[in-house]
């Protein structure tokens, strides 16, 4: 989670919502580290975990991340949770819960849907306070007219 938090801080410094993600391979090696790139790429789908999963799959030469772990600082949104299903991610570890936009423990609870093709192991709330504080600080700065 430390690497994901560092990627989130780097994203905030670029003016992005501070979310960071890391994909760990089956042996625990880091396959990818990404922060949000929505604003700089002008791409609403450029969420940290989606970018990290794409990079990891490319490095592995496979569209499946079955024995991999995605570590992300914020509960994945429905889009990212659905992508995790299609990537067949083995485990998802996230920091802050997202009651408004989450798709795992909140909202549509993608992995609990009857038609869900794959259900990864989920561990939420890891370093939750740090992850939430980073997000709160970022949005407080925006409200006060400070970028990131």
Image (spheres, rainbow, N blue to C red):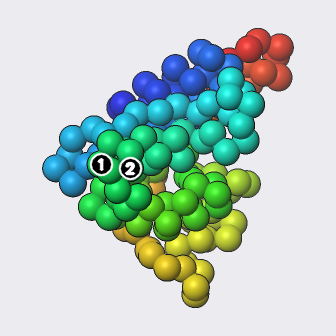
Is 111 on the left-hand or right-hand side of 70? right
The answer to whether any part of residue 139 appears in the image is: yes
Query: Which residue shows up at 27% across the image and 38% down it?
Result: 30
Residue 17: x and y, percent? 66, 31
Question: Residue farthest to the left?
Answer: 27
Looking at the rendered structure, the secondary structure element under dot 1 is helix
Q: Are marks 1 and 2 in contact (CB under 8 Å)?
A: yes
User: Residue 110: which numbered mark, if any?
Assistant: none
Residue, disc 1: 60
Q: Nearer the viewer, residue 63 or 28?
A: 63
Query: Which residue shows up at 71% across the image and 37% down it?
Result: 43
Looking at the rendered structure, the secondary structure element under dot 2 is helix
Q: Please, is residue 119 above or below residue 133 in the view?
A: below
Q: Please, is residue 135 above or below residue 49 in the view?
A: above
Number of residues whose C-alpha sits closer than 10 Å to that of mark 1, classed few (under 14), some (14–19) or many (20 or more):
few
Is 15 on the left-hand or right-hand side of 95? right
Q: Tag count in the figure?
A: 2
Is 135 on the left-hand or right-hand side of 26? right
Query: Which residue shows up at 63% across the image and 39% down it?
Result: 46
Residue, disc 2: 57
The answer to whether any part of residue 1 appears in the image is: no
Query: Which residue shows up at 73% across the image and 19% down it?
Result: 141
Q: Nearer the viewer, residue 108 or 49?
A: 49
Q: Quadrant of the C terminus?
A: top right
Q: Nearer the viewer, residue 74 or 82?
A: 82
Residue 11: x and y, percent? 57, 24
Indicate the quadrant where residue 118 lies: bottom left
What is the distance, in whole Å, between disc 1 and disc 2 at their CAs? Answer: 5 Å
């Amino acid at each position: 989670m430390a690497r994901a938090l560092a990627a989130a801080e780097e994203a905030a410094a670029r003016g992005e919502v501070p979310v960071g993600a890391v994909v760990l391979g089956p042996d625990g090696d880091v396959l990818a580290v990404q922060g949000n790139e929505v604003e700089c790429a002008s791409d609403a789908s450029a969420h940290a975990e989606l970018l990290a999963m794409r990079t990891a799959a490319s490095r592995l030469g496979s569209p499946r991340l079955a024995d991999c772990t995605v570590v992300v600082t914020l509960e994945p949104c429905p889009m990212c949770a659905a992508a995790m299903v299609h990537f067949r991610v083995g485990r998802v570890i996230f920091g802050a819960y997202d009651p408004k936009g989450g798709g795992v423990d909140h909202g549509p609870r993608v992995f609990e849907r009857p038609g869900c093709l794959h259900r990864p192991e989920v561990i939420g709330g890891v370093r939750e306070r740090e992850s939430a504080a980073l997000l709160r600080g970022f949005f407080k700065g925006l409200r006060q007219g400070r970028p990131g």
